[in-house]
Amino acid sequence: MIYESYYPLGMHLKRCYPCRNQVAPGFSAEDPEELPASSGGSLPRAVLRTDRLFLTLHLTMKRYSLLFTLWIAANPAAVVALDVRAYIEKADQLIVLGQPGLARAYLEPALIAPELHESERSRAYYIRGYSFADERLYVSARLDYNRALEFNPDNPGALVALGDLQRSGLGIEPNPEYALKLYEKSAKLGYTLGKVATGRAYLLGEGAPRDIQVARRWLAEAASSGDANAMMHLGASFRLHDSPDADPQEAKAWYLKAAESGAAEAQVAVGFMYRNGELGDRDPTEAFAWYQRAADLGLAAGQTLVGHAYLQGQGVSRNVAAATDWFEKAAAQGDSDAQVAVGFLFEAGQGKPADLEMALKWYRRAALAGNPEGMSRYASLMGGRSDPVSQREAVIWFRKLAAKDKDLANSAAWLLATSTHPDIRDGQEAVRLALVATEGNQKAAVMDTLAAAWAEAGDFDKAVEIQKQALALPDGQDPRHRSGMEKRLEFYEQGRPWRE
């Protein structure tokens, strides 16, 4: 299921590409030679002048970018002839077209061209950094963003981009305080995305204590420029339960403004408000209508919510076939929640023939995208298999989630303690994970795992002690599980670990 928070449209590292239609500091907006290409207008003269050269060098640069770079280094005079400013604009276009690797090839001459102004070189490094981030090469992205700021400390796009990495801990240890400093510097330079990022940080208390009024001031400035993301966050600020001036109608008004500005996510947010009863009584039918609007606009999250509504019969008659169609549309866009849902349909045999291999395929796809439920379902199915390869894979995914989900820490500990395969078992690691699972979670099943872990670690006295505690708990009296727990206690008393 989609995780619903008060901030359904968070700031994402991969924003709409901000280089285009913006003039970097140090550039003259009056000179078309220095303007980036506009998605709706004509290209700069420098680009038009070199289109034929681009055409002849395109395949060479795509396949032989390293050789091309070496050639440029050996023939620096050629850089001028190639018109490196036009190459920067070409790279800009390629980023928008989803070709970050080729964009980097076009940027190589610009990065070493002696005639570029420092602000121009800063922009080139920033664009290349963005191309790395687009491919999740975050360490390289961070290095380029830093280089961009060396050449122009006031490059607002680089400030925000580096702040995003610092906030999210991508390619570097998380540092929300430093991220906020970068955001605020960009905001004070008048950069809209910097204002949005600063407002969001104060709204969530990331890098500084939460300050809703400061957040709204920055967000309102960005919203006045027509930024839909700022409008979304302003709407969220009026939904906060602990806000002294929470106002659901004001929140809805901002969401509607965001929707008018092109944010289909705003319609999902209004749907959540109706579903949660924030605008009166809970109204799943009205919630569904808002999800449907977003889905019809092609928003994957809206399509997934419509799919869940059809699958569960919430706000609309249950229709598994319709649910399947909407899940598949969203999954085709890469929505990991939808990928989990398609996996579930195969696992449960609903709307699809029951097929565990196909379920695993979809769960793994969602897991690789970082979806916690996808990770959990994939690991659980793999852990239920008897072969060591599957169990080892399950342990890897359980460990990734152990710090966030105590139930999954418990699952990993159980596998490590009880697997029939010696190369899977690890008593000390099982004990560590089981102790994580038991923190504030004194349930019989969790204590049962801890006992098995101590047994695998060779401390049978501790295993017996913990297993007796598990059996004494209220849920340890459940006849469905008690006989198995008693059997394991007998094993520990005999100095034998449990195998399953």
Image (cartoon, rainbow, N blue to C red):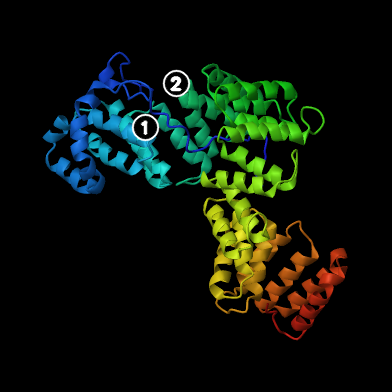
Q: Residues within 10 Å of mark 1 (few under 14, many from 20)?
A: many
Residue 183: x %, y % from top left: 49, 29
Can you see residue 146? no
Residue drawn at (37%, 45%) of the image: 140
Name, please, the residue furthest toward the top.
30
What residue did someone put label 2 on? 189
Residue 277: x %, y % from top left: 78, 32
Q: Nearer the viewer, residue 128 or 174?
A: 128
Asked whether, in this view, residue 437 is left or right of residue 116, the answer is right
Query: Which image quarter is the C terminus in?
Result: bottom right
Secondary structure of residue under mark 1: helix
Can you see residue 78? yes
Q: Are marks 1 and 2 in contact (CB under 8 Å)?
A: no
Residue drawn at (73%, 58%) of the image: 439
Residue drawn at (46%, 19%) of the image: 190
Q: Amino acid at mark 2?
A: Leu
Where 463 sits versus 289, above or below?
Answer: below
Q: Nearer the viewer, residue 294 or 266?
A: 294
Q: Residues within 10 Å of mark 2 (few under 14, many from 20)?
A: some
Residue 210: x %, y % from top left: 65, 30
What residue did someone put label 1 on? 149
Where 479 sits versus 87, above or below?
Answer: below
Residue 483: x %, y % from top left: 83, 76
